[in-house]
Amino acid sequence: MSVIIDVFSGRPNPVLVVSEPLAQQVRELVLTRRRAAVAGWPSLALPLGFRGLVVEDSDDASTMRLGIPGMSDAAEFDHVEELLRSLTEMSWPSELDRTTYDVIIEAVNAARQWRGPLRDTPAADAPTTPQQDVQFEAECPYSRLDFNPSAWNQFGIVQTNNCYNYGTNFRTNTFAQPGAGSGRRWSSIACDAIGQAAVNDGARWLRDCVPPSGQPALAMACVIWPGADYHWYRLHPRFWAHKPGQTPVRDTDDSGATILNVETCNRGPYTQFCGYVWAAANMRVA
């Protein structure tokens, strides 16, 4: 059995390997909470930050999600916190340091209070948008591709591509990391480090126009969850859209509003706005 802590957008989610007898306790918890639990990879627009524990049990080939913001009750979140503490004591994942663990526990508590709208993510390629224009200006030539969520929201694709894949428009199925394509991966969760890693892959700073060989250029915006994670957005004809980690692409923020201004929209814990870069068509994304 494995338990995925679905919390990050850019970084890979921590995965805890669970052995007996704790695995049986998890099964019992899933059975008692089955009414609240949903299939592991829902089509719902879950918020940025903690989105639940995804339990994958090889014994019965099931995948269930516990601790869902806006759906689970206080008792279930109590179970989730207790389970997290028990699991990490037994099997501390290498990608989860103590500081990040503390941030995750804070995110679980924030998820308890989240009351945003739970809505289906766009299934069709035509979004519902207000008759307003997105707020973004640039002097460089660039393109705004049509919104096409169905290309990203398919089972098997949605789990293996993240916000950086979507922002750059490269579907690698590798949960791509800024800098991995160039061999100069990001070294810290900071605006300069994440931005420079994307530039290492072939992106361009906003003041540095993409040459014809790299067109069509796409506008991306980067934000940071301080001390925890990064997140990318991509510009479309009349709004911004994003892909929070292993969840579906959507054109709404954590308040359920269409994203017209990525600097002021509700980004949950990703409170630090870094800025904009150009994604070039000849980037190396991996």
Image (cartoon, rainbow, N blue to C red):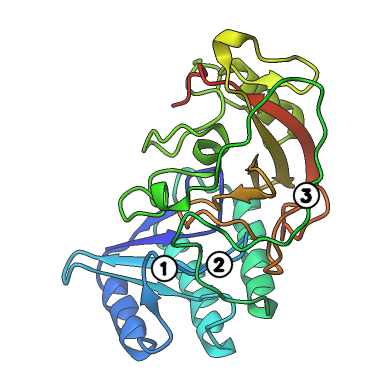
Above or below 238: residue 106: below
Q: Nearer the viewer, residue 239 or 274?
A: 239
CB within 8 Å, label 1 to label 2: yes
Q: Residue at x 44, y 27 (%)?
A: 286
Gap in angstroms between the C-alphas marked 2 and 3: 25 Å
Q: Nearer the viewer, residue 58 or 270?
A: 270
Gap in angstroms between the C-alphas marked 3 and 1: 30 Å
Left or right: 260 as drawn, with respect to 148: right
Q: Nearer the viewer, residue 234 or 142?
A: 142
Q: Position of residue 199 (x, y in %)?
A: 64, 19
Return the mark for residue 46.
2
CB within 8 Å, label 3 to label 1: no
Q: Give the residue furthest to the left.
A: 59
Give the structural element (helix, strand or loop) at label 1.
loop
Residue marked by disc 3 = 133
Return the mark for residue 42.
1
Left or right: 277 as drawn, with respect to 181: right
Hey, which quadrant is residue 17 in on the image?
A: bottom left
Please name the amino acid that badge 3 sits on: Asp
Give the structural element (helix, strand or loop) at label 3.
loop
Please name the amino acid that badge 2 sits on: Leu
Hey, which quadrant is residue 37 in on the image?
A: bottom left
For discs 3 and 1, the disc positioned in front in the rendered view: 3
Please name the amino acid that badge 1 sits on: Pro
Q: Position of residue 57 (x, y in %)?
A: 24, 67
